[in-house]
Image: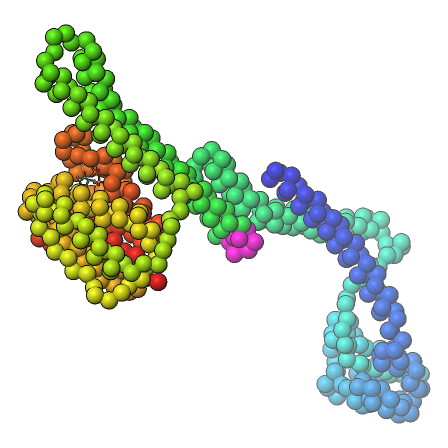
Amino acid sequence: MKRKLSNQFLRNFLVIFLLTILATALAFVLLSFASGLISGSLAKNQYPASAIIKKDYRQIDASAIVQSGGGVQVVDKEYRVVYSSGLDTIGKDRLTAEEFTTFLTESKSKPYHYDILYQPEGEFWLIVTFPTSIRLNFSLVYNKEAAAGDFMRAGWVITFVVLSYILLLGLFAFIYSRVTAASITVPLKKLCYGTKLLREGDYSARVDLRLRNEFAELQNTFNEMAARIEQEITLRKKSEEDRRRLILDISHDLKNPMASIQGYTELLMRKKGMTEPEGEEYLKVILNNSKRANRLLTELFELSQIDSPEFSLKLIKTDICEYIRQICGELVPQLEREGFRYEFDIMEESVFTLLDTNRFSRIIQNLANNVMQYNPQGTLVAVSLTVQNNQVVIDFSDDGIGIPAHLAVNIFNPFVRVDDSRNSKTGGSGLGLSIAKKIAEAHGGDLTLHPNENKGSTFRITIPVI
Ligand code: ADP
């Protein structure tokens, strides 16, 4: 691709190169044509020395020349300037023969036009001078009477100069075409390389062109695209990992109760001469394990329901203070029965929020069950409700065993438990807090865990005020 593009550039520049040579030749033709056109109107051509010369130089009328910005001098045979009017480039009254010869020979290279005529009868030179406006001293002169050797030498030199000029022009065209092509092919190459890396799965690939032109825009778009792909791939990997972990955790957590149910049922069927209390003991184990499996499946179903796109809440404008007071009231008999202390601090005013009361009660119920399940009797349960920055803040605290700080975020992930032994006696499914957090989020709020200064834990539910 690079080669094709640079060749295209070379072809374009070769066309430019040929056009330049053509334009140069045309410029010379035009110059000589234009010079011929205007020569008649130039002052130097209007007043030649031959037009004013007289036998007696005293009769020469130089007024028109002087008026046109020129000058007239007469030099006699003794090289004395015997007459001078207007522009004088000789600058002396008398010249030596050598000075006059120098003046004559150098007159062509001076920025003046000299028309010099000798009057044999009056024995004087008439010099008409005009300042030259612009003059290009270039002319190709050909004389066939010149010596053949001279002609060859001069011809070679001219051919060499012309060829060098064309070669130089060609070389410049070639170098410039490569340089210009490189300004396109180099960034293109870098972008192609970046794209190739992306295609091969290196999503950290970025392009740095150090340019400010349209390529920089392309580079930014490429980098943004790569960053987005990288982000999405990371998210996908994470969600795949989460899914894999979830399936592993589910199968792991279901395996024990199911194996136990199967084992004890087989025992009941096969064991001969079993006593009644023994049979009842086995049935109790089967019942407990099926309850555990059932709870796990129910909670899993609830979690996947909340996660599904069809999930929606039945939101009703509710006075949350009144509602929380009512829920806390319902908790009291259970707390007292289990031997837990309690403390409620709910604002007196009415604060309205949009609530799906059935779902929302699940959060409080789960938090209360956890306190009772994981903490010793006598633990204090404190519920407070305040409004901060247009948010209702419900703090659900206990002064129990607490949750390690390093689990503050992860505890809301499915199947995460402080005691991860998956012992049926100590733990539940590890799904309760995940479900509670998702319900809070679906209400536009959140459920977070905050470390308690003394001991225990504080779960904070936030929900926007309407
Ligand atoms: P589970 O069904 O196991 O109760 P949760 O998601 O509700 O699942 O709780 C996750 C874990 O967090 C529990 O297994 C428990 O170890 C811990 N936990 C939750 N609440 C408390 C609490 N108030 N005090 C101590 N530990 C708690």
Let me know if residue 105 appears in the view. Answer: no
Nearer to us in this view, 10 or 419: 419
Residue drawn at (31%, 47%) of the image: 359
Is residue 343 shown above or below 33?
above
Work out whether residue 13 or residue 234 is closer to the camera in this orientation and state it. Answer: 234
Q: In the drawing, does residue 229 fall left or right of residue 132?
A: left
User: In the shown orientation, is residue 144 left or right of residue 283?
Assistant: right
Q: Nearer the viewer, residue 293 or 281?
A: 281
Is residue 213 found inside the magenta-colored segment of the image? yes
Task: Left or right? Give the position of 357 relative to 398.
Answer: right
Spot occupied by residue 134 in the image (x, y as percentages of width and height): 76, 73
Which residue of the protein is positioned furthest toward the front in this rendering?
276
Quadrant of the picture in which ligand 1 is shown: top left
Quadrant (top left, top right, bottom left, bottom right) of the N terminus: top right
How many marks are shown on the rendered structure?
0
Spot occupied by residue 431 in the image (x, y as percentages of width and height): 26, 38
| Residue 337 image-quadrant placement | top left
| Residue 308 colored in magenta in the image | no
Q: Work out whether residue 466 can be spotted.
A: yes
Residue visible at 54% across and 50% down?
Answer: 218
The colour scheme used here is rainbow
Q: Which quadrant of the view contains residue 93?
A: bottom right
Residue 154 pos. (x, y %): 78, 52
Q: Residue at x 89, y 80 (%)?
A: 46
Q: Residue furthest top?
A: 272
State which quarter of the image contains the C terminus. Answer: bottom left
Which residues, given as a range, are shown in magenta?
211-217
Residue 70, horizontal then vertical, whole percent: 80, 85
Quarter of the figure with residue 417: top left
Task: Please state which of residues 344 and 255 is positioned toward the viewer in this rendering.
Answer: 344
Q: Which residue is found at the position 77% from the left and 86% from the top? A: 87
